Amino acid sequence: MKISVSYLNVKKRYVEDVIAFLDTTDVDFIHVDVMDGKYVKNKVNSFSDVDEISYYTQKRLDVHFMVMKPLKYIDDFASLNVFCMTFHLKIKNDLDKVIERCHEYGIKAGIALEPDEDLTLLEPYLDKIDLVLIMSVKSGLPGQEFIKETVPKIKALRDKIKKENRNILINVDGGINLENKDFLGDADILSVGSCITNSDDFQKTISDLRG
């Protein structure tokens, strides 16, 4: 199980310290939430913000775009150490073009599914994407509780990927902690925020989440 750490809940003045400390752990990715204030109400993590924090880590970035027009972001973010860029279905750009642009840079492309969105919405893109981000909270705000109804959706997606022999990663994002992580064994990546960043021992918590 790979772990991607979100710093969305970290106060801005502490972000660089937290990122630098995470770099000393064996965490796999830094999860970056980019919000434009239009797809969701919040507006966080402009390119300049993320470019600045990238100096404090060698970890690859797992970038989740909650924006309406992601095409205008991709070229800039592709200059960073990005593992995957993930986008939502209800954007105002052509999603096929968005996916293609990521692949032109050799970056994985993912689609995020909101808790109320069905897996069938992925069908037109399954031959093109590398990752599905299953949202286990509603997009936009940190600190929400895990939506337990997400679990059967994850299992159904895993079964579909196996049945169709697809090379697609499953990332789960939102409200994940040491109490519910055992229900998420069908995922490849867990995107975890406050469970890690509010803990006294980042590395121990990361190891416990893998276990």
Image (spheres, rainbow, N blue to C red):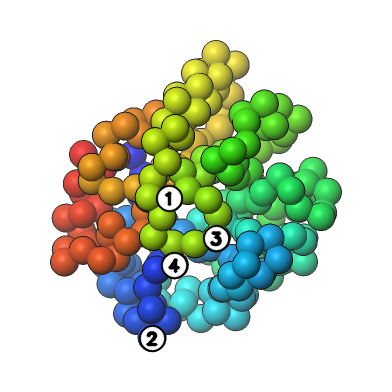
Instruction: Give the alpha-carbon distance from disc 2 to disc 3, as whole Å.
Output: 20 Å
* Dot label at residue 124: none
Whether residues under marks 2 and 3 lie with C-beta atoms below 8 angstroms apart, the answer is: no
SS for callout 1: loop
Task: Write the residue at 77% across / 66% down.
Answer: 72
Q: Position of residue 70 (x, y in %)?
A: 73, 60
Residue type for callout 1:
Gly
Q: Which residue is mark 3?
A: 140
Residue lying at the far bottom of the rendered structure = 13
Q: Quadrant of the rendered structure where residue 209 is? A: top left
Q: Amino acid at mark 2?
A: Arg
Compare marks 4 and 3 and give the one earlier in the sequence: 4
Left or right of 72 on screen, residue 148: left
Q: Secondary structure at mark 2?
A: helix
- CA gap, disc 1 to disc 2? 23 Å
Above or below residue 164? Residue 81 is below
Q: Quadrant of residue 21?
A: bottom left
Which of labels 1 and 2 is toward the front? 1
Q: Which residue is mark 4?
A: 8
| Mark earlier in primary sequence (2, 4) | 4
Q: Position of residue 113 (x, y in %)?
A: 60, 41
Q: CA distance from mark 1 to mark 3?
A: 10 Å
Q: Name the residue tied to disc 2.
A: 13
Mark 1 or 2, nearer chain start: 2
Residue at point 79%, 43% (across, down): 96
Q: Amino acid at mark 4?
A: Leu
Residue at the spot 38% in from the left edge and 79% down from the top edge: 11
**Residue of label 1:** 174
In the image, taking residue 88 as reference, residue 174 lies left or right, namely: left
Sequence-first tag of 1 and 3:
3
Crowd band around label 3 with a 10 angstrom C-alpha radius: few (<14), some (14–19), many (20+): some
Question: Residue 147 appears at what percent x and percent y?
Answer: 42, 41
